Image (cartoon, rainbow, N blue to C red):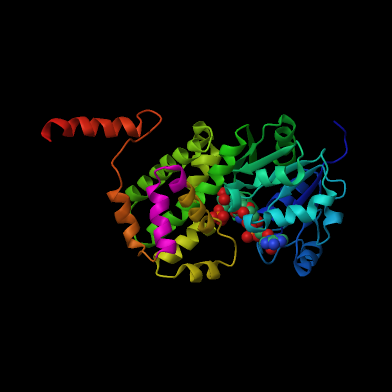
């Protein structure tokens, strides 16, 4: 490997993109960050601060922000795409003329595209056809990373070069980067947990106890892994940082935007009011709709996603969600040990002789 510093491009001027850009610069990379807002780009370059998304964070002064895609991508070895899912494909298309097959392309975005139910790394693949593609996901609240609180993420890719280069670019003493080759599972974990973060925020606002929170998170893990396995992911991924790790943090912290949307709903706001007050992306709002529809289409049992969907989009009061959870099927605890079908069969056998 050459002694030249790695050249990293970050697309997106939000909180996560900004934190990752600064970490890469701390690790000695030459970092360029692309964003749309010229005033924010000027502020990052002048004050080394992102006043809109991470006002108290001292960005490494070596990060150079720009609104010009060519300047940011020129010569980049690693491109991190930190753009909300709704705009992801559009931004990758804008970037496409300056991307090439030797680069490593990594999505940091925890969302799903409606058409075709596609995850973001699939979009990277479709738009470029390049071989070095990965995703990062894990318990990664940007605000805490900005405070240099210890945490870790997962780089998931089939391609070993992508994994090792991202570990080198981003790993440091407060941000560990673990590797996985289950790209789909890691990416799906990041998207799915946002649904349950909304439910947890809502439940907290409604005064739930700690037993309830624990039950909610654990049944959420069962539900998300059931869905993910149906879609082809490896269930073991959900034992890791991008599964249970990210689920715990986003279901516990009001630093999570999805959790905050849930809290606002539990306090009586409408969905529009909750999203408007947030002023940033809460991917779970869209994800719950897409996942609920997909689960129905594919016959996957997802009572929590269904209940949350009804609260968000069908006017069911938030209090009803807890009731629906308690009325769900009393089935298997861990389905990979005892299948739901075996529990159902045992009930049928038990009922048999009594009519
Ligand atoms: N903030 C966090 O704690 C974490 C966020 N993520 C994921 O990273 C993704 C990006 O998140 P953040 O940086 O937090 O987002 P953010 O909401 O803070 O901002 C996203 C950035 O994208 C820009 N953007 C939005 N629409 C655009 C468009 N059409 N064209 C160009 N730029 C556009 C915004 O102006 C902003 O600079 C999200 O999908 C989220 O799931 C992942 C881990 C942690
Ligand atoms: O994914 C995250 C933490 O890992 C960030 O969650 P929010 O998008 O809900 O803020």
Q: From the viewer's perspective, is 213 left or right of 233?
A: left
* Secondary structure character of the magenta stretch overall: helix
Side of 234 where 128 appears, left or right: right
Q: Report the span colored magenta.
A: 295-314
Place of residue 154 in the rendered image (x, y in percent of width and height, measured from the top left): 62, 38
Look at 59% across and 48% down and name the residue there: 116
The location of residue 279, given as percent across then percent down, is 59, 67
Residue 34 drawn at (x, y percent):
77, 57
Classify the position of the N terminus by image quarter.
Answer: top right
Q: What is the number of callouts on the image? A: 0
Q: Is residue 253 left or right of residue 127?
A: left
Identify whether 197 is placed above or below 46: above
Q: Does the magenta segment cover residue 342?
A: no
Residue 204, compared with residue 272, is above or below; it is above
Residue at point 52%, 55% (across, down):
284
* Quarter of the figure with residue 67: bottom right
Q: Residue furthest left?
A: 354
The reply to whether residue 332 is in sight is: yes
Image height of 350 relative to 223, above or below: above
Q: Is residue 144 visible?
A: no
299 in magenta: yes
Residue 195 percent location from the top left of the image: 48, 52
The quarter of the displayed image where residue 186 is located? top right
Q: Quadrant of the C terminus?
A: top left
Front residue of 163/188: it is 188
**Measuring 53% from the left and 43% from the top, which residue is drawn there?**
189
Image quadrant assignment for residue 84:
bottom right
């Amino acid at each position: 490997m050459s002694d030249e510093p790695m050249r990293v491009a970050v697309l997106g001027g939000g909180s996560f993109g900004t934190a990752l850009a600064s970490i890469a610069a701390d690790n000695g990379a030459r970092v360029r960050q692309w964003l749309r807002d010229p005033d924010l780009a000027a502020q990052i370059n002048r004050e080394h601060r992102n006043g809109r998304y991470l006002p108290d964070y001292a960005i490494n002064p070596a990060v150079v922000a720009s609104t010009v895609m060519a300047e940011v991508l020129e010569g980049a070895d690693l491109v991190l795409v930190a753009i909300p899912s709704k705009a992801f494909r559009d931004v990758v298309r804008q970037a496409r003329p300056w991307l090439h097959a030797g680069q490593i392309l990594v999505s940091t975005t925890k969302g799903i595209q409606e058409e075709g139910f596609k995850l973001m790394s699939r979009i990277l693949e479709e738009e470029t056809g390049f071989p070095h593609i990965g995703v990062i996901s894990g318990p990664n609240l940007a605000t805490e990373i900005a405070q240099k609180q210890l945490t870790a993420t997962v780089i998931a890719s089939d391609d070993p070069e992508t994994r090792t280069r991202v570990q080198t670019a981003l790993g440091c003493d407060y941000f560990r980067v673990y590797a996985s080759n289950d790209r789909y599972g890691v990416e799906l974990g990041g998207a799915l947990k946002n649904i349950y973060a909304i439910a947890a925020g809502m439940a907290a606002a409604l005064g739930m106890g700690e037993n309830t929170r624990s039950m909610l998170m654990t049944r959420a893990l069962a539900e998300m892994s059931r869905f993910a396995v149906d879609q082809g992911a490896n269930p073991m991924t959900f034992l890791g940082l991008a599964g249970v790790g990210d689920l715990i943090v986003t279901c516990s912290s009001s630093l999570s935007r999805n959790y905050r949307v849930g809290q606002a709903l539990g306090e009586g706001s409408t969905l529009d009011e909750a999203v408007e007050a947030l002023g940033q992306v809460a991917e779970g709002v869209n994800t719950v709709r897409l996942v609920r529809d997909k689960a129905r289409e594919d016959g996957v049992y997802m009572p929590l996603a269904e209940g949350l969907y009804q609260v968000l989009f069908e006017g069911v009061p938030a209090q009803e969600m807890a009731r629906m959870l308690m009325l769900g099927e009393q089935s298997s605890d861990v389905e990979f040990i005892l299948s739901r079908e075996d529990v159902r069969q045992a009930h049928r056998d038990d009922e048999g002789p009594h009519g």
